[in-house]
């Protein structure tokens, strides 16, 4: 699965070695040593996937990730030496699609690139999901309620789309962590936060749900109002 990859890494030796090896896997790869250079390239509509190192000289990688998300939905794999669970949760919640803990091999990175592209290319196939008056256009990444556009963040849309694909059944929290946040386990408080934001945008409250129903200790179900 060939991809156009932007590798954002400030260490020139590491960057050149990874560029060379990723090209051997068939990818078209460019490199950037600074966050602002990467942002310009992404804004120009270049890469299929971004590999983002957090230790950049001009801007903290976490801030760079937020800025990337403001201009593009391009998949981002974070490369970090910060392996604490809370830090990983924060990065995934800020819009990272996957992460790698340093040091890692080019082969490992290649496998993660392929996995992210499989997910995103599958997700962007033409697909429209309808649950009552709620309509989710996966291809356009747009959602409407009673014909009114919903202003959703990237993760709010991903969460809503996953629940809509499984409308009428309870989706377990572990599944949401794995499929929406690409996180095998850990603190699921971030799910509650995103559900709260999503409820407000759907015009409902946890105490008086219409579409989003929480099954305590199990998960969440999206269903049309009766």
Image (cartoon, helix red, strand yellow):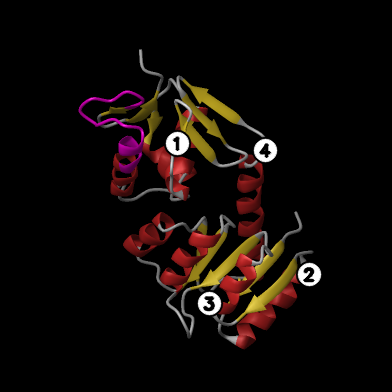
- Please name the residue that numbered disc 1 is placed on: 160
Q: Earlier in the sequence, mark 4 or mark 2?
A: 2
In this rendered view, identify the residue nearer to me: 18 or 138: 138
- Please name the residue that numbered disc 4 is placed on: 125
Q: What is the CA distance from the residue labelled 3 to the residue labelled 4? A: 30 Å
In this rendered view, identify the residue nearer to me: 64 or 101: 64
Q: Which mark is residue 24?
A: 2
Q: Is residue 14 above or below residue 194?
A: below
Magenta: main secondary structure: loop
Query: Residue 12, percent across and down?
Result: 62, 87
Q: Which mark is residue 35?
A: 3
Secondary element at tag 4: loop
| Camera sees residue 132 | yes
**Residue at 68% from the left image edge and 82% from the top image edge:** 16
Query: Residue 33, percent across and down?
Result: 58, 82
Q: Earlier in the sequence, mark 3 or mark 4?
A: 3
């Amino acid at each position: 699965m060939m991809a156009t990859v932007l590798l954002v890494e400030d260490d020139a030796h590491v960057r050149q070695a990874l560029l060379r090896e990723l090209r051997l896997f068939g990818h078209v790869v460019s490199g950037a040593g600074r966050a602002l250079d990467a942002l310009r390239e992404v804004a120009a509509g270049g890469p299929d996937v971004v590999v983002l190192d957090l230790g950049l000289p001009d801007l903290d990688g976490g801030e760079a990730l937020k800025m990337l998300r403001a201009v593009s939905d391009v998949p981002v794999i974070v490369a970090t030496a910060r392996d604490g669970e809370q830090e990983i949760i924060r990065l995934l919640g800020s819009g990272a699609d996957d992460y790698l803990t340093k040091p890692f091999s080019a082969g490992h990175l290649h496998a993660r690139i392929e996995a992210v592209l499989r997910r995103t290319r599958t997700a962007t196939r033409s697909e429209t999901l309808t649950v009552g008056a709620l309509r989710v256009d996966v291809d356009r990444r747009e959602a409407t309620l009673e014909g009114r556009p919903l202003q959703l963040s990237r993760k709010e849309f991903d969460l809503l789309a996953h629940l809509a694909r499984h409308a009428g059944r309870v989706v377990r929290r572990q599944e949401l962590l794995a499929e929406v946040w690409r996180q095998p386990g850990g603190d699921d408080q971030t799910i509650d936060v995103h559900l709260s934001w999503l409820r407000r945008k759907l015009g409902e409250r946890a105490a008086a749900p219409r579409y989003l129903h929480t099954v305590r200790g199990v998960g969440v179900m999206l269903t049309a109002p009766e």
